[in-house]
Each structure stands twice: as C-alpha cells, then as structure tokens.
Image (tube, rainbow, N blue to C red):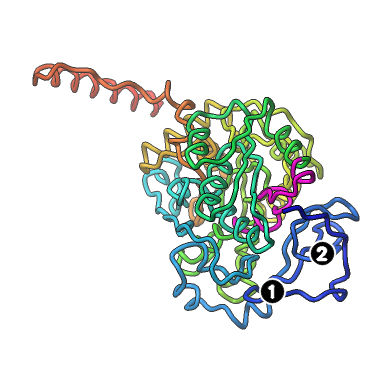
Amino acid sequence: MTQALEAPLSISAFTFDQTGGHFSHLACKECGTEYEPKATHVCQECFGPLEVKYDYESLKRTVTRERIEAGPNSIWRYRDFLPVTSENPIDVGTGMTPLLKANRLAKRLGLKELYIKNDAVNMPTLSFKDRVVSVALTRAKELGFDTVSCASTGNLANSTAAIAAHANLDCCVFIPSDLEAGKVLGTLIYGPTVMAVKGNYDQVNRLCSEVANTHGWGFVNINLRPYYSEGSKTLGYEVAEQLGWKLPDHIVAPLASGSLFTKIYKGFQEFIKTGLVEAKDVRCSGAQALGCSPIYEAFKEGRDFIKPVKPKTIAKSIAIGNPADGIYAVEQARNTNGHIEAATDEEIIEGMKLLAETEGIFTETAGGTTIAVLKKLAEQGKINPDETTVAYITGNGLKTQEAVQSHAGEPLTIDPKLDSFERAWDRAQTLDRLEWQQASV
C-alpha cells in the first residue's frame, strides 16, 4: 500500500473517525500546525516533528484506576492513552515488566530507595522496543498497511520482525551490517527480509526514508513515528501504577534518539492531567555512551542544538549520532533539574557486571550505560539518597554477549574428584577475597 504525504489542514476542515480512541490529530511540536492522524511524521511548514494530540477532558471522564487495573496484563491496559482505535490491538503480552526494589545495588551506591524497571524480560523479544512496535503495528493495520519496516540498531528489528509475524504482516527491516550476532539472529528467526547496510545507523535511517517515500511501506520509526513513540509512555504508566499510584522522585534512563526519555515523562504528566496520580516534580536524568554522546555534549555545553557525531561505542543500541529528539531530551533534563551524563565503554561493561552481581539482571550495553551513569550521579551527589529513584533497563544482555565475554571470567575446570574440587574452591575463595579488597581500596 502506498500513501502520499498529507498537507497540513485546519482541524475544522475535516472530521475524524476515531471510534474507540481519545486521540484527535497530529500537531507539530515546533509551530503547532495540525494534521490528520495518518502516516506522516514531519511538518510540511517548518519540518518539525509531529506528535499525537489527545482529548484529556474525555480521558479524565472515562479512565479510572479501577478501569486500568481490570484491563489486560500488558500495555493495552492503558489503551485509552494510546493512539489506536481498534478494540483488538496487537497484544503479544508486552509490558507490565517487573519493578524490582534494588536493595543490594542501592547499598553499593549509597542510596535508600532504588528501583529497577526491568524491560530485559519484556515480551516477545526482551527489550522495550516491543512496546513501541505493538502500538505502531496496530496503527499500521488501522491505516491499511500490509508491509512494515524499520531502521534499527538491533532491538527494533527484533521486535518489528516478531510482532509483524504474529500480526501476519509482510516485513523488511534494515540494520547496520556490523550488528551483534545475537541481534541479527534474533531478527532472522522470524522470517523477515533483512537488509544489512554497510554504514552506521544514521546512514541506514536516511536510506529508509527514501524507501518509505518510494515504496509507501509503514516504517515504524519514520512515517509511523508519532504513533510508535507513544508506546514508550507505558514505561511511565507502569512505574506509577507499580509504585502504588505514585510518581518517583527521580528517573535515570538511556538516551538514543531521546524519544524514550521524553515519553516516559509525558506518561507521568498524562496521569497527573487525568487525576490518576497526585502532581509531583519528577527529576529526569539521561545516560549516553561517551563514544556517541551528542545529547550529553549539548547539555554539558549549555547548547540549544545538537551537533551530530559519528558513533564509536560498544553500546550500539543507543548509538544514534543525530538524535531526532535530542534537544527535547536536553530541555527536559534542564527543566526538571535533572542531569545528563556519559560513560566510557569500560564503565559500561562495569555497569553491566554491577547490575548482574547485585540484582541478578543481565542487561545489554544500553542498560550498562544507565547503571554506569546512575553510579556516577550517586557518587557526584546528584541523586538524593532519600529520593525514590527508578533506573530503566531497556534490553537483555543475551543480545550483546560480545561486550562482556572477555570480562566475565572463566569456569574452573576440575577432575571428577573431591580433592580437585577442594583445590579449585580454595583458589576461587582466595581470588574473591582479593577482588573484594581491591574494590574496597
């Protein structure tokens, strides 16, 4: 199916058929120009990004805590807040992932109230991308698309391929050719067409924009981006609900395009607007890999614009050199009295190990970045120990095993004899004591 770009229209010039939905139209975040809620993502007047607009008065009259709690155990318990009209959205069990009280990690960092929102176990492909894709492909079907696609650093390709297979949609995804093997296999298994492009993510994304315009496919993070990005709000909704219908004091989340960061906060604000939670100032801090940190650099230098960079980091899933929502992430951190920090590749690996050793969560490099930055902020006194802080872990470490393979140690090989075991055990205990002593210095 091919769809032409939509020209801007006055809202009074047309009528929407939004049966089952509380959203009304798209609007430019920069100039406010309004558009029909179709497959379009860039303002034709100023080239600003488009976002979905909702009728919050209608939501306030309709949605209650009880209505949400009676819904499915997935992101679709929040269907009223999402840009779909279908009574039967694509539901593969995405969402309602654990919010873990991270006592051991908190003690290591000198904090008291630390939680981990663990999307490393999200369904079906073990990353937060399952949320955004579930929403985008539901909207794609509503708009009549039969072929869907994406530009991806790995996790999005996994999700798009898996959920497209479930929804009986043709799928072709585009990835950089140097992705981690686990992410490539995690896409191929679902049977899509996979295009491995000789270039970085930003080059892949530019190619996909051309393909979207030429072939008229539904690209979840291009022409369907306004709907796709709304799926990230569910990470805000779930944390509020899981905290007993309260907002946290501080969040720390990874930054790639900046969309996830801003949408979590939007989710908090929507719950406030509709009376589901009490108003509260939530501080928002973001984490980037130093080898691809255009948002961090803008924040650090006090700039109101992003300078694109060429990525060079092990954290490939967040290695976007020209982030679409980067400046909005900078503004959000500033406006909420938050911070943006960056971590080296070595610190990212240590972050992955720290989370695994303290809380039993094996996260990918994006999560390692978040934990490394959480640690830095705690050490710098930028997190109040008494604050309720939530760190968002967005993907599973099984996808990026290469990053820590040479840093995780080796098994002790022994003979099938008790004395061989005893010698190895004594050696292991000695090594553990030395490591503990070194860490304490």
Label 2 element class? strand
Viewer-proximal residue, 46 or 292?
46
| Residue that appears at 81% across and 42% down | 305
In this image, 177 relative to 352: left or right? Answer: right
Label 2 sits on residue? 35
Q: Residue at x 53, y 61 (%)?
A: 90
Q: Nearer the viewer, residue 379 or 215?
A: 215
72 sits left or right of 373 in the view: left
Which residue, given by chain and number where applicable, does mark 1 sit on?
A: 18
Q: Does 173 lie within the magenta span?
A: no
Is residue 225 covered in magenta? yes
141 left or right of 70 in image: right
The image position of residue 246, as x and y in percent, is 51, 67
Whole-percent x and y of residue 280?
A: 60, 66
Q: Picture coordinates of residue 325 (x, y %)? A: 73, 48
Residue 277 falls in image quadrant:
bottom right
How many other residues sit within 10 Å of disc 2, few (<14), some (14-19) or many (≥20)?
Answer: many
Structural crowding at the residue carrying mark 1, measured as other residues with C-alpha within 10 Å and reported as few (<14), some (14–19) or many (≥20): some
